[in-house]
Amino acid sequence: MQKLKSYIVGLSLFFVPLFFLPITHEFYNINKFMLMAISSIALLSISSYQFLKTRQISWSKNSLRILLPMSIFLVTVSLSTAIASTNKVQAVLNYTYGPLILAVFMVFYWYISREESDNTVGLMLRFSGLCVSVITIILFFHPFDSVILPKTFQFLKNQNFTPLGTQLDLMLFLGFVLIYQFLHWLKTKKETRRTDWLAILGVAISTTALVLSFLTLTQRSTSSLAQNTAPLNLSLKATVESLSTPFGFVLGSGINNFSSVFTQVKDSAHNSSESWAVNSYDNAYSAILQVLVESGLLSALALVGVFVSGFLIGRSKASLILLGYMAMMFLTTPASLIQFLLLYCALGIIASDSTKNRKQTIHISEKKSLFLIGFINASTLITLTLFFVFGLVPTYRAEMAMRSSVDAVANNDLRELYNNQYSAVILNPYIERYRLNFSQTNLFVAKQMATRSNPDQAIITSSVQQAINEAQSAISLNPKKASNWENLGIIYKNVLGVKGAEQWAIAAFQRAILLDTQNVSYRLELGGVFYSLKQYENAIKIFQEATLLKPDLPNSYYNLAHSYYQNQNSKEAVRVMDMLLVLLKKQSSTNYEKVLKERNDFASGMPQNQAPTVIQ
Protein backbone atom coordinates (compact mmCIF):
# COMPACT_ATOMS: atom_id res chain seq x y z
CA MET A 1 0.00 0.00 0.00
CA GLN A 2 2.84 2.37 0.81
CA LYS A 3 4.34 1.83 -2.67
CA LEU A 4 0.95 2.50 -4.24
CA LYS A 5 0.66 5.79 -2.38
CA SER A 6 4.20 6.73 -3.43
CA TYR A 7 3.36 6.05 -7.05
CA ILE A 8 0.17 8.14 -6.84
CA VAL A 9 2.06 11.08 -5.31
CA GLY A 10 4.95 10.74 -7.75
CA LEU A 11 2.79 10.44 -10.85
CA SER A 12 0.64 13.37 -9.73
CA LEU A 13 3.72 15.58 -9.31
CA PHE A 14 4.89 14.46 -12.73
CA PHE A 15 1.62 15.22 -14.51
CA VAL A 16 0.43 18.41 -12.75
CA PRO A 17 2.94 20.77 -14.46
CA LEU A 18 2.23 19.14 -17.83
CA PHE A 19 -1.51 18.64 -17.48
CA PHE A 20 -3.99 20.85 -19.31
CA LEU A 21 -7.04 20.21 -21.47
CA PRO A 22 -8.45 22.44 -24.23
CA ILE A 23 -11.97 21.26 -23.42
CA THR A 24 -12.46 23.80 -20.60
CA HIS A 25 -12.78 27.58 -20.81
CA GLU A 26 -9.66 27.92 -18.68
CA PHE A 27 -7.20 25.29 -19.92
CA TYR A 28 -4.78 25.05 -17.04
CA ASN A 29 -5.56 25.62 -13.37
CA ILE A 30 -8.93 23.90 -13.18
CA ASN A 31 -7.53 20.76 -14.82
CA LYS A 32 -4.50 20.69 -12.53
CA PHE A 33 -6.84 21.26 -9.59
CA MET A 34 -9.07 18.35 -10.62
CA LEU A 35 -6.11 16.02 -11.04
CA MET A 36 -4.78 16.83 -7.57
CA ALA A 37 -8.25 16.54 -6.00
CA ILE A 38 -8.75 13.05 -7.48
CA SER A 39 -5.27 12.01 -6.31
CA SER A 40 -5.95 13.36 -2.79
CA ILE A 41 -9.20 11.41 -2.50
CA ALA A 42 -7.41 8.27 -3.71
CA LEU A 43 -4.60 8.72 -1.15
CA LEU A 44 -7.03 9.30 1.72
CA SER A 45 -9.12 6.30 0.66
CA ILE A 46 -6.08 4.02 0.70
CA SER A 47 -5.04 5.35 4.12
CA SER A 48 -8.57 4.77 5.47
CA TYR A 49 -8.50 1.19 4.22
CA GLN A 50 -5.06 0.67 5.78
CA PHE A 51 -6.26 1.97 9.12
CA LEU A 52 -9.32 -0.29 9.14
CA LYS A 53 -7.13 -3.24 8.28
CA THR A 54 -4.14 -2.66 10.59
CA ARG A 55 -5.63 -0.36 13.26
CA GLN A 56 -2.33 1.48 13.29
CA ILE A 57 -1.49 5.17 13.07
CA SER A 58 1.94 6.43 12.13
CA TRP A 59 3.26 9.97 12.07
CA SER A 60 6.51 11.86 11.91
CA LYS A 61 7.54 14.53 14.37
CA ASN A 62 8.97 16.99 11.88
CA SER A 63 6.09 16.47 9.47
CA LEU A 64 3.71 17.56 12.23
CA ARG A 65 5.85 20.61 13.04
CA ILE A 66 5.30 22.01 9.56
CA LEU A 67 1.71 20.74 9.36
CA LEU A 68 0.71 22.86 12.39
CA PRO A 69 1.34 26.31 10.80
CA MET A 70 -0.09 24.94 7.54
CA SER A 71 -3.29 24.08 9.39
CA ILE A 72 -3.40 27.55 10.96
CA PHE A 73 -2.94 29.08 7.51
CA LEU A 74 -5.83 26.98 6.17
CA VAL A 75 -8.07 27.96 9.10
CA THR A 76 -7.35 31.70 8.75
CA VAL A 77 -7.93 31.63 4.99
CA SER A 78 -11.17 29.71 5.57
CA LEU A 79 -12.30 32.30 8.13
CA SER A 80 -11.51 35.11 5.70
CA THR A 81 -13.50 33.30 3.02
CA ALA A 82 -16.49 32.65 5.29
CA ILE A 83 -16.61 36.11 6.88
CA ALA A 84 -14.94 38.66 4.59
CA SER A 85 -15.33 37.33 1.04
CA THR A 86 -18.24 38.79 -0.90
CA ASN A 87 -18.70 35.86 -3.28
CA LYS A 88 -17.98 33.00 -0.90
CA VAL A 89 -18.50 30.09 -3.30
CA GLN A 90 -16.18 31.60 -5.88
CA ALA A 91 -13.64 32.21 -3.12
CA VAL A 92 -13.80 28.57 -1.96
CA LEU A 93 -13.14 27.48 -5.55
CA ASN A 94 -10.20 29.88 -5.92
CA TYR A 95 -7.49 27.93 -7.75
CA THR A 96 -4.59 29.81 -6.18
CA TYR A 97 -4.99 29.55 -2.42
CA GLY A 98 -8.67 29.07 -1.69
CA PRO A 99 -9.58 26.78 1.23
CA LEU A 100 -10.24 23.77 -1.00
CA ILE A 101 -6.98 23.89 -2.93
CA LEU A 102 -5.02 24.52 0.29
CA ALA A 103 -6.55 21.36 1.79
CA VAL A 104 -5.45 19.43 -1.30
CA PHE A 105 -1.93 20.90 -1.06
CA MET A 106 -1.77 19.79 2.58
CA VAL A 107 -2.69 16.23 1.64
CA PHE A 108 0.15 16.20 -0.89
CA TYR A 109 2.57 17.68 1.64
CA TRP A 110 1.67 15.03 4.21
CA TYR A 111 2.28 12.09 1.89
CA ILE A 112 5.49 13.57 0.45
CA SER A 113 6.84 14.18 3.96
CA ARG A 114 6.18 10.55 4.91
CA GLU A 115 8.33 9.18 2.11
CA GLU A 116 11.34 7.34 3.54
CA SER A 117 13.43 8.54 0.60
CA ASP A 118 12.93 10.95 -2.27
CA ASN A 119 13.52 8.28 -4.93
CA THR A 120 9.96 8.14 -6.30
CA VAL A 121 8.90 11.74 -5.66
CA GLY A 122 12.27 13.21 -6.60
CA LEU A 123 12.57 11.14 -9.75
CA MET A 124 9.09 12.08 -10.96
CA LEU A 125 9.69 15.75 -10.19
CA ARG A 126 12.97 15.78 -12.10
CA PHE A 127 11.45 13.84 -14.99
CA SER A 128 8.53 16.28 -15.15
CA GLY A 129 11.00 19.16 -15.23
CA LEU A 130 12.89 17.46 -18.05
CA CYS A 131 9.69 17.02 -20.10
CA VAL A 132 8.63 20.65 -19.53
CA SER A 133 12.13 21.79 -20.51
CA VAL A 134 12.10 19.80 -23.75
CA ILE A 135 8.63 21.15 -24.62
CA THR A 136 9.82 24.70 -23.90
CA ILE A 137 12.86 24.30 -26.14
CA ILE A 138 10.74 22.88 -28.98
CA LEU A 139 8.06 25.58 -28.73
CA PHE A 140 10.71 28.32 -28.74
CA PHE A 141 11.31 27.58 -32.44
CA HIS A 142 7.55 27.78 -33.30
CA PRO A 143 7.23 24.43 -35.08
CA PHE A 144 3.47 24.84 -35.62
CA ASP A 145 3.49 28.25 -37.30
CA SER A 146 3.27 26.82 -40.81
CA VAL A 147 1.16 23.79 -39.88
CA ILE A 148 -2.59 23.71 -40.48
CA LEU A 149 -4.12 22.77 -37.14
CA PRO A 150 -7.74 22.06 -36.13
CA LYS A 151 -9.48 24.91 -34.32
CA THR A 152 -9.18 23.03 -31.01
CA PHE A 153 -5.39 23.08 -31.22
CA GLN A 154 -4.83 26.60 -32.52
CA PHE A 155 -3.45 27.53 -29.09
CA LEU A 156 -0.23 25.70 -30.05
CA LYS A 157 0.55 28.63 -32.38
CA ASN A 158 0.40 31.06 -29.47
CA GLN A 159 3.97 32.22 -28.90
CA ASN A 160 3.39 32.41 -25.15
CA PHE A 161 1.86 28.94 -24.79
CA THR A 162 3.19 26.68 -22.05
CA PRO A 163 1.57 23.68 -20.32
CA LEU A 164 1.95 25.50 -17.00
CA GLY A 165 -0.34 28.33 -18.08
CA THR A 166 1.84 31.44 -17.92
CA GLN A 167 5.45 32.19 -18.78
CA LEU A 168 6.05 33.34 -15.21
CA ASP A 169 4.86 30.00 -13.81
CA LEU A 170 7.08 28.28 -16.36
CA MET A 171 10.13 30.23 -15.20
CA LEU A 172 9.24 29.61 -11.56
CA PHE A 173 8.92 25.85 -12.14
CA LEU A 174 12.06 25.57 -14.27
CA GLY A 175 14.04 27.50 -11.66
CA PHE A 176 12.80 25.19 -8.91
CA VAL A 177 13.59 22.03 -10.90
CA LEU A 178 17.00 23.36 -11.93
CA ILE A 179 17.97 23.99 -8.29
CA TYR A 180 16.58 20.62 -7.23
CA GLN A 181 18.42 18.77 -10.01
CA PHE A 182 21.68 20.58 -9.25
CA LEU A 183 21.42 19.79 -5.53
CA HIS A 184 20.59 16.16 -6.32
CA TRP A 185 23.66 15.95 -8.57
CA LEU A 186 25.91 17.34 -5.82
CA LYS A 187 24.41 14.93 -3.28
CA THR A 188 24.88 11.93 -5.59
CA LYS A 189 28.44 12.95 -6.42
CA LYS A 190 29.27 13.29 -2.73
CA GLU A 191 27.77 9.93 -1.78
CA THR A 192 28.97 7.83 -4.74
CA ARG A 193 32.05 9.85 -5.79
CA ARG A 194 30.93 9.32 -9.38
CA THR A 195 29.78 11.71 -12.06
CA ASP A 196 26.08 11.32 -12.80
CA TRP A 197 25.98 12.28 -16.48
CA LEU A 198 22.22 11.89 -16.60
CA ALA A 199 21.83 14.49 -13.84
CA ILE A 200 24.26 16.81 -15.64
CA LEU A 201 22.21 16.43 -18.83
CA GLY A 202 19.05 17.30 -16.87
CA VAL A 203 20.67 20.42 -15.44
CA ALA A 204 21.88 21.48 -18.89
CA ILE A 205 18.46 21.01 -20.51
CA SER A 206 16.66 22.81 -17.68
CA THR A 207 19.13 25.70 -17.86
CA THR A 208 18.65 25.97 -21.63
CA ALA A 209 14.85 25.96 -21.25
CA LEU A 210 14.99 28.61 -18.50
CA VAL A 211 17.17 30.89 -20.66
CA LEU A 212 14.90 30.44 -23.69
CA SER A 213 11.83 31.14 -21.55
CA PHE A 214 13.41 34.37 -20.38
CA LEU A 215 14.29 35.31 -23.96
CA THR A 216 10.69 34.69 -24.98
CA LEU A 217 9.55 37.26 -22.43
CA THR A 218 12.13 39.86 -23.42
CA GLN A 219 11.68 39.47 -27.18
CA ARG A 220 7.89 39.79 -27.25
CA SER A 221 6.67 43.36 -26.74
CA THR A 222 3.21 42.01 -25.85
CA SER A 223 4.55 39.59 -23.27
CA SER A 224 4.55 40.37 -19.61
CA LEU A 225 6.07 38.67 -16.63
CA ALA A 226 2.75 38.63 -14.86
CA GLN A 227 -0.60 38.97 -16.53
CA ASN A 228 -3.40 40.73 -14.67
CA THR A 229 -0.99 41.77 -11.90
CA ALA A 230 -0.97 45.15 -10.16
CA PRO A 231 2.26 47.18 -9.98
CA LEU A 232 4.23 47.19 -6.73
CA ASN A 233 3.32 50.73 -5.61
CA LEU A 234 -0.43 50.16 -5.95
CA SER A 235 -0.16 46.70 -4.41
CA LEU A 236 1.45 48.31 -1.35
CA LYS A 237 -1.32 50.93 -1.25
CA ALA A 238 -3.92 48.16 -1.46
CA THR A 239 -2.22 46.39 1.45
CA VAL A 240 -2.31 49.53 3.60
CA GLU A 241 -5.95 50.14 2.64
CA SER A 242 -7.01 46.60 3.49
CA LEU A 243 -5.20 46.59 6.84
CA SER A 244 -6.42 50.06 7.82
CA THR A 245 -9.53 48.76 9.61
CA PRO A 246 -9.52 46.39 12.61
CA PHE A 247 -11.56 43.83 10.70
CA GLY A 248 -9.33 44.03 7.63
CA PHE A 249 -6.22 43.92 9.80
CA VAL A 250 -7.26 40.52 11.14
CA LEU A 251 -9.08 38.85 8.23
CA GLY A 252 -8.33 41.05 5.22
CA SER A 253 -10.79 42.04 2.53
CA GLY A 254 -11.70 38.45 1.64
CA ILE A 255 -10.40 35.92 -0.88
CA ASN A 256 -11.00 37.04 -4.50
CA ASN A 257 -11.50 40.67 -3.43
CA PHE A 258 -8.14 42.18 -4.39
CA SER A 259 -9.66 43.83 -7.48
CA SER A 260 -12.21 45.66 -5.32
CA VAL A 261 -9.48 47.01 -3.03
CA PHE A 262 -7.35 48.01 -6.00
CA THR A 263 -10.07 50.26 -7.43
CA GLN A 264 -10.19 52.10 -4.10
CA VAL A 265 -6.47 52.95 -4.11
CA LYS A 266 -5.96 53.58 -7.82
CA ASP A 267 -4.41 57.03 -8.22
CA SER A 268 -3.90 59.62 -10.96
CA ALA A 269 -0.50 58.16 -11.78
CA HIS A 270 -2.24 55.03 -13.00
CA ASN A 271 -4.21 57.10 -15.54
CA SER A 272 -0.91 58.47 -16.85
CA SER A 273 0.56 55.00 -17.34
CA GLU A 274 0.32 52.76 -20.41
CA SER A 275 -2.06 50.45 -18.54
CA TRP A 276 -4.61 53.19 -17.77
CA ALA A 277 -7.34 51.32 -19.68
CA VAL A 278 -7.04 48.37 -17.28
CA ASN A 279 -9.84 48.99 -14.81
CA SER A 280 -8.55 46.59 -12.18
CA TYR A 281 -6.23 43.69 -11.43
CA ASP A 282 -7.02 40.37 -9.77
CA ASN A 283 -3.49 39.77 -8.46
CA ALA A 284 -1.13 41.73 -6.24
CA TYR A 285 2.51 42.23 -7.17
CA SER A 286 3.58 39.37 -4.91
CA ALA A 287 2.01 36.42 -3.14
CA ILE A 288 2.70 37.77 0.35
CA LEU A 289 0.99 41.07 -0.52
CA GLN A 290 -1.98 39.14 -1.95
CA VAL A 291 -2.32 37.21 1.31
CA LEU A 292 -2.09 40.40 3.37
CA VAL A 293 -4.76 42.17 1.30
CA GLU A 294 -7.22 39.31 0.98
CA SER A 295 -6.84 37.34 4.23
CA GLY A 296 -5.19 39.72 6.66
CA LEU A 297 -2.27 39.69 9.05
CA LEU A 298 -3.21 36.38 10.71
CA SER A 299 -2.90 34.47 7.45
CA ALA A 300 0.32 36.26 6.54
CA LEU A 301 1.84 35.37 9.92
CA ALA A 302 0.71 31.76 9.51
CA LEU A 303 2.35 31.65 6.08
CA VAL A 304 5.55 33.10 7.52
CA GLY A 305 5.29 30.42 10.22
CA VAL A 306 5.19 27.76 7.50
CA PHE A 307 8.45 29.08 6.07
CA VAL A 308 10.08 29.42 9.50
CA SER A 309 9.16 25.83 10.40
CA GLY A 310 10.70 24.66 7.15
CA PHE A 311 13.92 26.60 7.80
CA LEU A 312 14.17 25.25 11.36
CA ILE A 313 13.67 21.64 10.28
CA GLY A 314 15.75 21.75 7.11
CA ARG A 315 19.23 21.85 8.57
CA SER A 316 21.03 20.94 5.32
CA LYS A 317 22.28 23.60 2.90
CA ALA A 318 20.26 22.00 0.11
CA SER A 319 17.03 22.40 2.09
CA LEU A 320 17.80 26.02 2.91
CA ILE A 321 18.58 26.84 -0.72
CA LEU A 322 15.37 25.22 -2.00
CA LEU A 323 13.17 26.91 0.61
CA GLY A 324 15.07 30.18 0.21
CA TYR A 325 14.24 30.15 -3.49
CA MET A 326 10.55 29.72 -2.71
CA ALA A 327 10.67 32.50 -0.11
CA MET A 328 12.17 34.84 -2.71
CA MET A 329 9.45 33.87 -5.20
CA PHE A 330 6.69 34.58 -2.65
CA LEU A 331 8.18 38.03 -2.08
CA THR A 332 8.67 38.96 -5.73
CA THR A 333 6.11 37.10 -7.88
CA PRO A 334 2.29 37.00 -7.85
CA ALA A 335 0.42 34.12 -6.24
CA SER A 336 -0.36 31.11 -8.43
CA LEU A 337 -1.34 27.46 -8.14
CA ILE A 338 2.12 26.31 -9.28
CA GLN A 339 3.79 28.59 -6.75
CA PHE A 340 1.88 27.16 -3.77
CA LEU A 341 2.25 23.60 -5.08
CA LEU A 342 6.04 23.99 -5.28
CA LEU A 343 6.15 25.44 -1.77
CA TYR A 344 4.21 22.54 -0.25
CA CYS A 345 6.25 20.09 -2.32
CA ALA A 346 9.54 21.65 -1.11
CA LEU A 347 8.36 21.50 2.50
CA GLY A 348 7.41 17.84 2.06
CA ILE A 349 10.84 17.03 0.65
CA ILE A 350 12.55 18.90 3.50
CA ALA A 351 10.51 17.06 6.13
CA SER A 352 11.17 13.72 4.41
CA ASP A 353 14.93 14.34 4.24
CA SER A 354 15.17 15.43 7.89
CA THR A 355 17.29 13.07 9.97
CA LYS A 356 14.84 13.42 12.87
CA ASN A 357 11.78 12.60 10.78
CA ARG A 358 11.43 9.09 12.09
CA LYS A 359 8.03 7.48 11.99
CA GLN A 360 6.24 6.67 15.20
CA THR A 361 3.53 4.04 15.09
CA ILE A 362 0.89 3.11 17.63
CA HIS A 363 -1.66 0.31 17.57
CA ILE A 364 -5.24 1.33 18.43
CA SER A 365 -7.04 -1.31 20.44
CA GLU A 366 -9.48 0.67 22.55
CA LYS A 367 -12.89 0.83 20.89
CA LYS A 368 -13.57 4.48 21.75
CA SER A 369 -10.23 5.66 20.33
CA LEU A 370 -10.69 3.42 17.30
CA PHE A 371 -14.14 4.88 16.66
CA LEU A 372 -12.98 8.49 17.15
CA ILE A 373 -9.99 8.20 14.82
CA GLY A 374 -12.04 6.31 12.27
CA PHE A 375 -14.75 8.96 12.46
CA ILE A 376 -12.24 11.79 11.90
CA ASN A 377 -10.64 9.94 9.01
CA ALA A 378 -13.98 9.09 7.41
CA SER A 379 -15.30 12.64 7.92
CA THR A 380 -12.28 14.16 6.17
CA LEU A 381 -12.59 11.74 3.27
CA ILE A 382 -16.35 12.22 2.95
CA THR A 383 -16.04 16.03 3.13
CA LEU A 384 -13.47 16.12 0.34
CA THR A 385 -15.53 13.68 -1.73
CA LEU A 386 -18.69 15.75 -1.30
CA PHE A 387 -16.83 18.91 -2.28
CA PHE A 388 -15.54 17.08 -5.32
CA VAL A 389 -18.89 15.63 -6.41
CA PHE A 390 -21.13 18.61 -5.67
CA GLY A 391 -18.61 21.42 -6.07
CA LEU A 392 -15.81 20.62 -8.49
CA VAL A 393 -17.67 18.33 -10.89
CA PRO A 394 -20.46 20.87 -11.68
CA THR A 395 -17.81 23.60 -11.89
CA TYR A 396 -15.81 21.52 -14.34
CA ARG A 397 -18.90 20.81 -16.44
CA ALA A 398 -19.69 24.53 -16.43
CA GLU A 399 -16.17 25.28 -17.67
CA MET A 400 -16.67 22.76 -20.46
CA ALA A 401 -19.94 24.46 -21.42
CA MET A 402 -18.23 27.86 -21.50
CA ARG A 403 -15.51 26.43 -23.73
CA SER A 404 -18.21 25.09 -26.07
CA SER A 405 -19.72 28.57 -26.18
CA VAL A 406 -16.35 29.95 -27.35
CA ASP A 407 -16.30 27.34 -30.11
CA ALA A 408 -19.85 28.35 -31.02
CA VAL A 409 -18.69 31.95 -31.51
CA ALA A 410 -15.96 30.73 -33.85
CA ASN A 411 -18.56 28.71 -35.78
CA ASN A 412 -21.00 31.66 -35.83
CA ASP A 413 -23.63 29.48 -34.10
CA LEU A 414 -25.73 31.78 -31.93
CA ARG A 415 -28.03 29.02 -30.69
CA GLU A 416 -25.14 26.88 -29.40
CA LEU A 417 -23.55 29.97 -27.83
CA TYR A 418 -26.73 30.74 -25.94
CA ASN A 419 -27.46 27.15 -24.87
CA ASN A 420 -23.94 26.49 -23.59
CA GLN A 421 -23.74 29.71 -21.60
CA TYR A 422 -27.17 28.97 -20.15
CA SER A 423 -25.93 25.50 -19.11
CA ALA A 424 -22.84 27.02 -17.47
CA VAL A 425 -24.98 29.41 -15.41
CA ILE A 426 -27.28 26.58 -14.33
CA LEU A 427 -24.39 24.25 -13.40
CA ASN A 428 -22.58 26.91 -11.37
CA PRO A 429 -24.63 30.06 -10.76
CA TYR A 430 -21.98 31.56 -8.44
CA ILE A 431 -19.30 32.44 -11.00
CA GLU A 432 -19.54 36.12 -11.90
CA ARG A 433 -17.96 35.91 -15.35
CA TYR A 434 -20.60 33.35 -16.40
CA ARG A 435 -23.32 35.83 -15.48
CA LEU A 436 -21.57 38.74 -17.20
CA ASN A 437 -20.98 36.79 -20.41
CA PHE A 438 -24.55 35.50 -20.48
CA SER A 439 -25.97 38.99 -19.96
CA GLN A 440 -24.01 40.28 -22.95
CA THR A 441 -25.11 37.29 -25.04
CA ASN A 442 -28.76 38.02 -24.28
CA LEU A 443 -28.24 41.65 -25.23
CA PHE A 444 -26.64 40.52 -28.49
CA VAL A 445 -29.61 38.23 -29.20
CA ALA A 446 -32.00 41.16 -28.70
CA LYS A 447 -29.95 43.37 -31.03
CA GLN A 448 -29.78 40.70 -33.70
CA MET A 449 -33.53 40.14 -33.58
CA ALA A 450 -34.20 43.88 -33.75
CA THR A 451 -32.27 44.16 -37.03
CA ARG A 452 -34.50 41.65 -38.82
CA SER A 453 -37.14 42.82 -41.27
CA ASN A 454 -39.86 41.17 -39.18
CA PRO A 455 -38.54 41.13 -35.58
CA ASP A 456 -40.18 39.01 -32.90
CA GLN A 457 -40.96 41.50 -30.11
CA ALA A 458 -41.50 38.72 -27.58
CA ILE A 459 -37.93 37.43 -28.10
CA ILE A 460 -36.52 40.96 -27.92
CA THR A 461 -38.37 41.68 -24.66
CA SER A 462 -37.44 38.38 -23.02
CA SER A 463 -33.77 38.67 -24.11
CA VAL A 464 -33.47 42.20 -22.76
CA GLN A 465 -35.07 41.17 -19.48
CA GLN A 466 -32.77 38.13 -19.22
CA ALA A 467 -29.75 40.35 -19.90
CA ILE A 468 -30.82 42.66 -17.08
CA ASN A 469 -31.48 39.73 -14.73
CA GLU A 470 -28.05 38.21 -15.37
CA ALA A 471 -26.31 41.56 -14.89
CA GLN A 472 -28.16 42.07 -11.61
CA SER A 473 -27.26 38.53 -10.53
CA ALA A 474 -23.57 39.31 -11.05
CA ILE A 475 -23.99 42.38 -8.83
CA SER A 476 -25.75 40.35 -6.14
CA LEU A 477 -22.79 37.95 -6.15
CA ASN A 478 -20.31 40.81 -5.71
CA PRO A 479 -21.71 44.33 -5.29
CA LYS A 480 -18.23 45.66 -4.41
CA LYS A 481 -16.89 45.08 -7.91
CA ALA A 482 -17.17 48.20 -10.08
CA SER A 483 -17.05 46.26 -13.37
CA ASN A 484 -20.25 44.41 -12.42
CA TRP A 485 -22.07 47.74 -12.11
CA GLU A 486 -20.51 48.92 -15.37
CA ASN A 487 -21.94 45.85 -17.12
CA LEU A 488 -25.44 46.62 -15.80
CA GLY A 489 -25.06 50.22 -16.95
CA ILE A 490 -24.07 49.10 -20.45
CA ILE A 491 -27.12 46.81 -20.64
CA TYR A 492 -29.48 49.65 -19.72
CA LYS A 493 -27.62 52.11 -21.97
CA ASN A 494 -28.43 49.88 -24.94
CA VAL A 495 -32.16 49.91 -24.13
CA LEU A 496 -32.70 53.56 -23.22
CA GLY A 497 -36.04 53.52 -25.02
CA VAL A 498 -37.44 51.19 -22.36
CA LYS A 499 -39.33 52.92 -19.55
CA GLY A 500 -37.08 53.57 -16.54
CA ALA A 501 -33.91 52.36 -18.30
CA GLU A 502 -32.29 55.79 -18.25
CA GLN A 503 -32.52 56.07 -14.45
CA TRP A 504 -31.09 52.57 -14.00
CA ALA A 505 -28.26 53.25 -16.47
CA ILE A 506 -27.31 56.48 -14.69
CA ALA A 507 -27.52 54.84 -11.26
CA ALA A 508 -25.39 51.87 -12.35
CA PHE A 509 -22.60 54.02 -13.81
CA GLN A 510 -22.69 56.34 -10.79
CA ARG A 511 -22.26 53.32 -8.49
CA ALA A 512 -19.36 52.08 -10.63
CA ILE A 513 -17.71 55.50 -10.35
CA LEU A 514 -18.26 55.51 -6.60
CA LEU A 515 -16.37 52.20 -6.36
CA ASP A 516 -13.67 53.25 -8.84
CA THR A 517 -13.28 57.00 -8.46
CA GLN A 518 -10.30 57.34 -10.83
CA ASN A 519 -11.93 55.52 -13.73
CA VAL A 520 -12.15 57.55 -16.93
CA SER A 521 -14.05 54.99 -19.03
CA TYR A 522 -17.00 54.90 -16.63
CA ARG A 523 -17.34 58.68 -16.89
CA LEU A 524 -17.31 58.53 -20.67
CA GLU A 525 -20.10 55.94 -20.51
CA LEU A 526 -22.14 58.01 -18.04
CA GLY A 527 -21.56 61.19 -20.01
CA GLY A 528 -22.73 59.37 -23.10
CA VAL A 529 -25.98 58.44 -21.35
CA PHE A 530 -26.60 62.07 -20.34
CA TYR A 531 -25.79 63.21 -23.89
CA SER A 532 -28.27 60.69 -25.37
CA LEU A 533 -30.93 61.98 -22.99
CA LYS A 534 -30.08 65.59 -24.01
CA GLN A 535 -29.10 66.40 -20.42
CA TYR A 536 -26.15 68.44 -21.67
CA GLU A 537 -25.37 70.21 -18.40
CA ASN A 538 -24.84 66.87 -16.67
CA ALA A 539 -22.87 65.54 -19.65
CA ILE A 540 -20.57 68.60 -19.51
CA LYS A 541 -19.89 68.04 -15.82
CA ILE A 542 -19.00 64.39 -16.31
CA PHE A 543 -16.82 64.95 -19.39
CA GLN A 544 -14.97 67.74 -17.55
CA GLU A 545 -14.15 65.25 -14.80
CA ALA A 546 -12.84 62.87 -17.46
CA THR A 547 -10.49 65.52 -18.89
CA LEU A 548 -9.12 66.26 -15.42
CA LEU A 549 -8.53 62.57 -14.67
CA LYS A 550 -6.73 61.95 -17.96
CA PRO A 551 -5.70 65.17 -19.70
CA ASP A 552 -4.16 63.33 -22.67
CA LEU A 553 -7.29 61.41 -23.74
CA PRO A 554 -8.76 63.02 -26.90
CA ASN A 555 -12.18 61.41 -26.59
CA SER A 556 -12.97 63.28 -23.36
CA TYR A 557 -12.37 66.68 -25.01
CA TYR A 558 -14.25 65.66 -28.14
CA ASN A 559 -17.35 64.66 -26.18
CA LEU A 560 -17.07 67.72 -23.97
CA ALA A 561 -16.93 70.03 -27.00
CA HIS A 562 -20.02 68.43 -28.54
CA SER A 563 -21.87 68.73 -25.22
CA TYR A 564 -21.04 72.44 -25.00
CA TYR A 565 -22.20 73.00 -28.57
CA GLN A 566 -25.50 71.16 -28.07
CA ASN A 567 -25.98 73.25 -24.94
CA GLN A 568 -25.82 76.40 -27.09
CA ASN A 569 -22.34 77.37 -25.88
CA SER A 570 -20.38 77.45 -29.15
CA LYS A 571 -17.63 79.64 -27.66
CA GLU A 572 -16.66 76.99 -25.09
CA ALA A 573 -17.10 74.26 -27.69
CA VAL A 574 -14.56 75.97 -29.98
CA ARG A 575 -12.18 76.54 -27.06
CA VAL A 576 -12.25 72.85 -26.14
CA MET A 577 -11.85 71.87 -29.80
CA ASP A 578 -8.73 74.07 -29.99
CA MET A 579 -7.31 72.25 -26.96
CA LEU A 580 -8.14 68.95 -28.65
CA LEU A 581 -6.38 69.98 -31.88
CA VAL A 582 -3.20 70.79 -29.93
CA LEU A 583 -3.38 67.37 -28.30
CA LEU A 584 -4.04 65.53 -31.57
CA LYS A 585 -1.16 67.33 -33.29
CA LYS A 586 1.14 66.35 -30.46
CA GLN A 587 0.01 62.72 -30.79
CA SER A 588 0.21 62.81 -34.63
CA SER A 589 -3.38 61.58 -34.80
CA THR A 590 -5.08 60.78 -38.11
CA ASN A 591 -8.25 62.44 -36.74
CA TYR A 592 -6.73 65.93 -36.85
CA GLU A 593 -8.40 66.97 -40.12
CA LYS A 594 -11.77 65.57 -39.05
CA VAL A 595 -11.71 67.49 -35.78
CA LEU A 596 -10.47 70.65 -37.50
CA LYS A 597 -13.48 70.57 -39.84
CA GLU A 598 -15.90 70.10 -36.93
CA ARG A 599 -14.19 72.91 -35.03
CA ASN A 600 -14.80 75.25 -37.97
CA ASP A 601 -18.41 74.04 -38.16
CA PHE A 602 -18.83 74.95 -34.49
CA ALA A 603 -17.34 78.39 -35.12
CA SER A 604 -19.76 78.99 -38.02
CA GLY A 605 -22.77 77.75 -36.08
CA MET A 606 -23.50 74.77 -38.33
CA PRO A 607 -25.99 72.30 -36.72
CA GLN A 608 -24.55 69.11 -35.23
CA ASN A 609 -27.35 66.64 -34.72
CA GLN A 610 -25.36 63.42 -34.49
CA ALA A 611 -23.88 62.13 -31.28
CA PRO A 612 -20.06 62.35 -31.06
CA THR A 613 -18.10 59.26 -32.06
CA VAL A 614 -15.08 57.75 -30.38
CA ILE A 615 -11.75 59.08 -31.63
CA GLN A 616 -8.23 58.00 -30.76
Image (tube, helix red, strand yellow):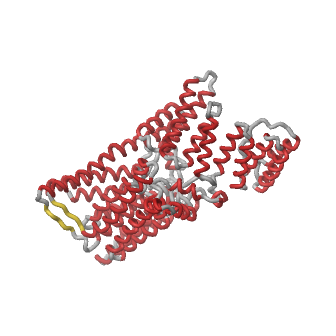
Is residue 311 visible in the rendered structure shown here? yes
Q: How many marks?
A: 0
Horizontal and vertical percent position of residue 307? 38, 69
Residue pictured at 78% horizontal, 56% vertical = 586
Q: Nearer the viewer, residue 507 or 412?
A: 507
Q: Is residue 603 left or right of residue 193?
A: right
Q: Residue at x 71, y 44 (%)?
A: 538
Q: Is residue 361 above or below residue 399?
A: below
Most distant residue in the right direction: 604
Residue 105 placed where, x, y %?
Answer: 35, 58
Pick the residue in front: 586 or 216. Answer: 586
Query: At which x and y percent is residue 251?
Result: 43, 59
Q: Quadrant of residue 270?
A: bottom right
Q: Position of residue 467 (x, y in %)?
A: 54, 35
| Left or right of 89, for residue 605 | right
User: Is 204 situated left or right of 123 in this image?
Assistant: right
Residue 180 visible within the image? no
Locate the N terminus by quadrant: bottom left
**Is 301 in front, or is 353?**
301
| Residue at the outermost front position | 246
Q: Residue furthest top?
A: 454
